[in-house]
Image: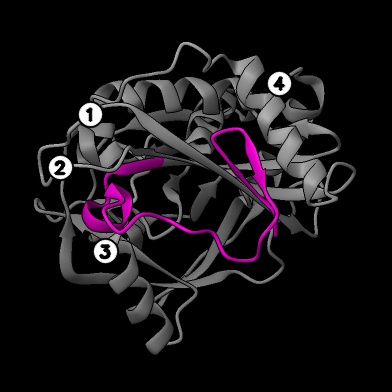
Amino acid sequence: MDYNLNGFIIRNKHLGIQVNNRGLNYGDGIFETIKFANNRINFWEDHYFRLMASMRIVRMDIPMTFSPEYLEEEIRKTLAANHLSDKSARIKLLVVRKAGGFYTPETNDIDFLITAEELSDSIYQLNEEGLNIELYKDFYKNSGMLGNLKSTSAQLYTVASIFRKENNFDECLLINERKEVAEAISANIFILKGDVLITPPLDSGCLKGIMRKKVIELAPQLGLSIKEEAFSPFALQKADEVWLSNSIKGLQWVGQYRKKSYGHQKATEMLKKININLALSLT
């Protein structure tokens, strides 16, 4: 894989970093995970503005060059270097504060790194078999604004993923300190009850997901009313469908949570809406 570090393509299998790199030492970084397909950066405008907002929240200085046009050009440069310009790819745009300092940084200037890996599907495909999910309860996801960011401080997601793998689940749900469902390890969550679609509010600590935003926008087109409200794990037992959303897979349906089984009729309709919306959009 070739990397894009601060606008320069690094043609090397190994990327050298400083010992005092702040991402390495303090998890002092944020990132965007983006899907590229059909010569399009999916929902690029939404990803760009989320990145800018996240950088402001964590007090990083935004370079004057960081326009959407500049970053798109750098993404496409990275795709070309990896021979992915005419394929589907998973892009990661990572921003870390420049090295120096301990907890208190010496500067708020940033470095950025772009990577790209090939994906098999150009459009979002609904999973054929429903996911089997479980609750992860060893540690809590903190509620509040920092929980809304895609941060390199990801130890909770790591240990939850190990639990998921050790117990042969497809995904696990994270709860906050109020014991409300916040999100899944790698996705936002929606529960459907009748014609009401419910997702945790941002103050639950859930990720401010791009696909979450799209599902909320498109729900009325399916005759669904949307509610952003907190719910406990017990609400899963009363749901008709449970969906997980992220930018790479689009939407996945949950088939099983403990002894409760779910269908996927509305999930199928929603994913069709997402693909149509993407095809008709310019960004």
Q: Looking at the image, which residue is at 66% across and 72% down?
A: 129
- Badge 3 vs badge 4, beta-carbon distance below 8 Å: no
Look at label 2 and name its amino acid: Gly
Distance, label 3 to label 4, CA atoms, is 32 Å
Quarter of the picture holding the C terminus: top right
Distance, label 2 to label 1, CA atoms, is 8 Å
- Badge 2 vs badge 1, beta-carbon distance below 8 Å: yes
Q: Position of residue 56 (x, y in %)?
A: 29, 20
65 left or right of 100 in image: right
Look at label 3 and name its amino acid: Gln
- Badge 3 vs badge 2, beta-carbon distance below 8 Å: no
Query: Nearer the observer, disc 1 or disc 4?
Result: 1
Work out whether 132 lies above or below 49.
below
Look at label 1 and name its amino acid: Thr
Q: In this figure, which residue is indicated by the disc labeled 2?
A: 101
Look at label 4 and name its amino acid: Thr
So how many labels did they put on this image? Answer: 4
Most foreground residue, 260 or 161: 161
Q: In this figure, which residue is indicated by the disc labeled 1?
A: 107
Q: Secondary structure at mark 2?
A: loop
- Who comes first in sequence, dot 4 or dot 2? 2
Q: Position of residue 239 (x, y in %)?
A: 41, 55
Q: Secondary structure at mark 4?
A: loop
Q: In this figure, which residue is indicated by the disc labeled 3?
A: 155
143 within the magenta span? no
Q: Which mark is residue 283?
A: 4
Which residues, given as a range, are shown in magenta? 1-30
